[in-house]
Image (tube, helix red, strand yellow):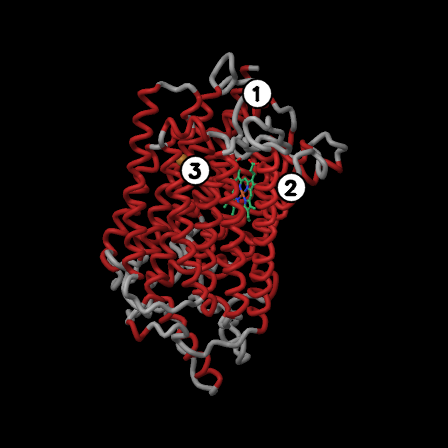
Amino acid sequence: MATGQLALTVLMGVFLIAVAAWLSRVEDWRSYAPLSGGGGYGRETGTAHEEKPAGLIRWLTTVDHKDIGILYGLYGTIAFIWGGLAVLLMRVELASPAQDVIEMSFYNGLLTSHGITMLFLFATPIIAAFSNYFIPLLIGADDMAFPRINAIAFWLLPPAAVLIWAGFFLDPLTGGQIQAAQTSWTMYTPLSAEQANPGVDLMLLGLHLSGVSATMGAINFIVTIFTERNNKVNWANLDIFSWTILTQSGLILFAFPLLGSALIMLLLDRNFATTFFTVGGGSPILWQHLFWFFGHPEVYILVLPPMGMVSYILPKFAGRKLFGFKFVVYSTLAIGVLSFGVWAHHMFSTGIDPRLRASFMAVSLAIAIPSAVKTFNWITTLWNGKLRMTAPMLFCIGFISNFIIGGVTGVFLAAVPVDLVLHDTYYVVGHFHYIVMGVIAFGVFAAVYYWFPIYTGRMYQRTLAKWHFWLVMVGTNLTFFGMLILGYLGMPRRYATYDFNPAITPMQAITALHQLATLGAFILAIGMAIFVWNIVMSWIEGPIVEDGDPWSLKETNQHGHEWHWHENRVNRSIVAADGGEEEVATDGGEDE
Ligand code: HEM
Ligand SMILES: [Cu+2]
């Protein structure tokens, strides 16, 4: 035994030295991608760039930040569809009180997969889609600081998804030996430690991989924003979106490695008889501390960049600069710092020390202050503005109104006595969906429409975009406001069936609210189908944007770096069409 271990240790040492030796021989590992600009302009003129291989090989080997951004976007969209279909099935089951459509264990699998997918495979990557594409353009850099690490970070994600979803595919293949994990996205122990289903292990491994990917991306963004800025871009005039990505990356750096460690500990508990989280040896509460020390910052990891998008886009259609820019930056940093001090508000009902509870309540209420600062800044930016109700603007306004509901319900939950009543009811589900669907997804939609001409060179169909907005806005509020009321009526979350004592709550009210929520979910799904259709069709055959300033931003002096880059590209392709010389792409290095 001892000699075996010794041999293994020596082997590992040799291996590590070999890796180090190899790395030291790889020259220029901090290399740059070829000058970007091959992103597809010139397609219309037939002067495609030679520097990138064509077709599938290009997408498999690309290290261009714009290509990687698009890959992240495609990935996030697929994950959103998967998570959306899962939830539609769940909502169908919940439309009636009895268990009549799907198996309860399947419901639990869907519930787990929906949460994990939406948070780790949709929301995190979809933000990376925008940051990868636009941060270098916004700060006047050629590319990310480490283009290859950027590509590696993305390519860790497809295997992560395969592992996370593996249980669903392997269930029929293995005759039920390996099933989808049924731990819920919080993976609370002892349930998750004791569930003897290899599907859980596969999911934990996939989750670990997705965390490694996010951490690699975060390091890349921090280095890029610190070292690759064009010399005209200093900290004082760094745009608000880059500020939020910088803060987000800082949060990822502290939060995700912790999740990774906790996942490893859980895997060890499951497979190697350690006792970190067991009832006898360790403590299930330890899991909750570790999980939520990651989990609460995670929600700000997801919400800060969309806040940055809205802070960036809203002023463009309000015709005036963002009100109190500095305070929007400060509030971003304040939320970033505070978010690490509130995790135990998810644990008020676990029996932790009441003094601890009180201090966590205080910090949680304090976080409302920087959040309110942001909200008032957005509203003040709108005030007396010359509003243009384009699709991105509609989504920005929807974002703010949903954020107010999501935020205020959160303040309620931060109060210990209120939380003790509402914990683990649908009120919680309603609260966080106002944020994840009504805020995070809305910010993303605003950004998709706002930047559409840049990454496609075309314009989307505006009428369809407005249909998308109204369906999603109505669907979100119908579904999740219904859930807030369900929570007040005492409906617990995570159940596939329900039954109530009429003396407490009439069954008809519960059923009707569930049906309302199901209706809302389907309205949402129709809106999303229109969105995907619009994006795909407009990408293929939308009208080509030949204007360097399609949103008329020059009028209000808000033509940012990325549009400058776009304008250069448009001009270049016009020159090329004339048979003239092509200039070298400079990625919008100059100021506007
Ligand atoms: C598209 C419309 C959506 C609908 C109709 C919807 C609906 C639901 C429902 C019914 C549940 C299960 C509640 C329960 O039984 O306890 C749930 C859970 C969850 N959803 Fe969504 N959802 C949507 C979008 C999203 C998005 C965009 C995200 C993330 C970005 C998300 C993240 C989550 C998470 C993390 C959970 C698990 C929460 C927990 O158990 O702690 N959802 N959702
Ligand atoms: Cu929290």
Residue 492 x %, y %: 54, 31
| Mark-to-mark CA distance, 1 and 3 | 23 Å
First in sequence, mark 1 or 3: give its number: 3
Q: Quadrant of residue 308?
A: bottom left
| Identity of the residue drawn at 49% across and 67% down | 39
Res. 153 visible in picture: no
Do tag 1 and tag 3 residues touch (Cβ < 8 Å)?
Answer: no
User: In this figure, which residue is indicated by the disc labeled 2?
Assistant: 95
**Secondary structure category for the residue under label 3:** helix
Quadrant where the N terminus sits is top right
Residue 592 x %, y %: 29, 71
Viewer-side residue, 338 vs 157: 338
Viewer-side residue, 414 vs 142: 414
First in sequence, mark 3 or 2: give its number: 2
| Mark-to-mark CA distance, 2 and 1 | 42 Å
Q: Is 267 on the left-hand or right-hand side of 390?
A: right
Mark sitting on residue 272: 1
